[in-house]
Image (tube, helix red, strand yellow):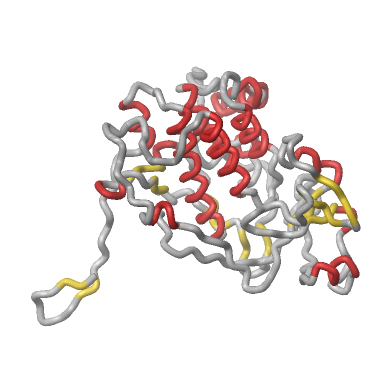
């Protein structure tokens, strides 16, 4: 943007004015968000965090205060902010995921922090997603089971919150709400340290709820006084994107004994054929990433493997983030991502 009226043109940075946070809006209507509003919020939050993750960054402080709505004609758009605690989860030099470490102090907000983060584990993409799950349940219930714990010091409080989170099952947390919410929470809690999350699957769970309750994504949130008139050509509807990999494939290596927990749903058919795991007869797990999947004890030793050749793809043999960590089941190559018309 240029400023005129002077002898020279100056480039100036314009900061966009944004609206209130989701926490402020939640409080303003007496902590009463409808299931429809929560699902629409969740879908947009997943969009934002997926893009952040595609840039090799984890947020590490996912909470309602760090999501705000736009102003005026952008009031239907949810923005993510406050990257003061953000961190790269990818080492550009070694082209590998950061290592798994234990004994770390909590970074973030205890109420929404993941069980692993509260346990002192290094954070990764899975922790951001588990925090999102807690946000959605907070909006649905108005209060989380571990809120209001009164103890003498912060460390003791964190310990009590961790104990309560561990003892509260996903079924108990989501009691009274569609089963998709329980599946959502279970999925995020069972992600492995270096695992590439299936963001599209999580979005589908929320969209399925909207279909069940016969609602649609119209951005008519509970805090809106009247239904917004949003043209179908608006960027919010046409903001389709994909992750670019520069011709390389990102690989998800999965323990064959954990296949059945992947989507926690009997409706998905998972089977193994010629060392390739197929989900609903398709050799991929994620509609965005479209990556073949191999059982961890059947990783091809080189790119000339017959199974690889038959799929017409390249295999990049990498070590897990930390071989001593039993939960590190994902190998992935470096990738870059691009998105057109991205809203923060």
Q: Quadrant of the C terminus?
A: bottom left
Quick check: 96 left or right of 84? right
List x then y, in percent, for residue 231: 33, 51
Tell me if residue 271 can be seen: yes
Q: Quadrant of the N terminus?
A: bottom left
Residue at horizontal 81 percent and vertical 67 percent from the top: 311
Tell me if residue 194 can be seen: no
List x then y, in percent, for residue 157: 54, 24
Quadrant of residue 169 in the image? Answer: top right
List x then y, in percent, for residue 322: 76, 54
Quick check: 308 left or right of 146? right
Residue at horizontal 57 percent and vertical 19 percent from the top: 176
Residue furthest out toward the left? 5
List x then y, in percent, for residue 159: 60, 26
Residue at horizontal 77 percent and vertical 56 percent from the top: 283
Q: In the figure, 227 relative to 331: above or below?
A: above
Who is closer to the viewer here, 162 or 189?
A: 189
Q: In the figure, 89 relative to 137: above or below?
A: below
Quadrant of residue 121 in the image? Answer: top right
Who is closer to the viewer here, 67 or 269?
A: 269
Quick check: 215 left or right of 228? right
Who is closer to the viewer here, 237 or 277?
A: 237
């Amino acid at each position: 943007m240029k400023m005129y009226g002077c002898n020279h043109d100056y480039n100036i940075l314009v900061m966009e004015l944004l609206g209130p946070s989701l926490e402020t809006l939640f409080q303003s209507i007496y902590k009463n968000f409808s299931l429809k509003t929560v699902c629409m919020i969740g879908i947009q939050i997943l969009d934002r965090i997926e893009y952040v993750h595609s840039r090799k960054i984890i947020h590490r402080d996912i909470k309602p205060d760090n999501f705000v709505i736009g102003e005026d004609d952008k009031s239907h758009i949810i923005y993510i902010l406050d990257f003061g605690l953000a961190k790269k989860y990818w080492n550009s030099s070694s082209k590998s995921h950061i290592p798994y470490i234990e004994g770390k102090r909590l970074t973030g907000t205890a109420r929404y922090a993941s069980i692993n983060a509260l346990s002192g584990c290094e954070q990764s993409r899975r922790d951001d997603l588990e925090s999102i799950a807690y946000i959605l349940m907070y909006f649905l219930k108005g209060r989380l089971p571990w809120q209001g714990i009164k103890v003498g010091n912060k460390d003791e409080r964190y310990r009590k919150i961790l104990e309560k989170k561990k003892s509260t099952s996903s079924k108990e947390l989501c009691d009274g709400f569609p089963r998709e919410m329980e599946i959502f929470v279970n999925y995020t809690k069972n992600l492995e340290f270096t695992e590439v999350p299936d963001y599209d699957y999580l979005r589908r769970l929320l969209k399925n709820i909207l279909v069940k309750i016969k609602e649609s994504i119209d951005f008519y949130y509970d805090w809106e006084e009247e239904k917004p008139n949003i043209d179908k050509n608006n960027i919010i509807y046409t903001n389709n994107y994909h992750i670019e990999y520069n011709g390389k494939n990102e690989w998800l290596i999965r323990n064959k004994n954990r296949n059945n927990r992947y989507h926690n749903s009997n409706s998905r058919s998972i089977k193994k054929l010629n060392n390739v795991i197929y989900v609903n007869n398709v050799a991929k797990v994620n509609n965005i990433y479209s990556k073949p999947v191999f059982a961890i004890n059947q990783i091809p030793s080189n790119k000339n493997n017959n199974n690889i050749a038959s799929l017409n793809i390249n295999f990049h043999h990498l070590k897990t983030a930390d071989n001593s960590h039993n939960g590190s089941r994902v190998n992935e190559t470096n990738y870059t991502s691009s998105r057109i018309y991205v809203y923060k």
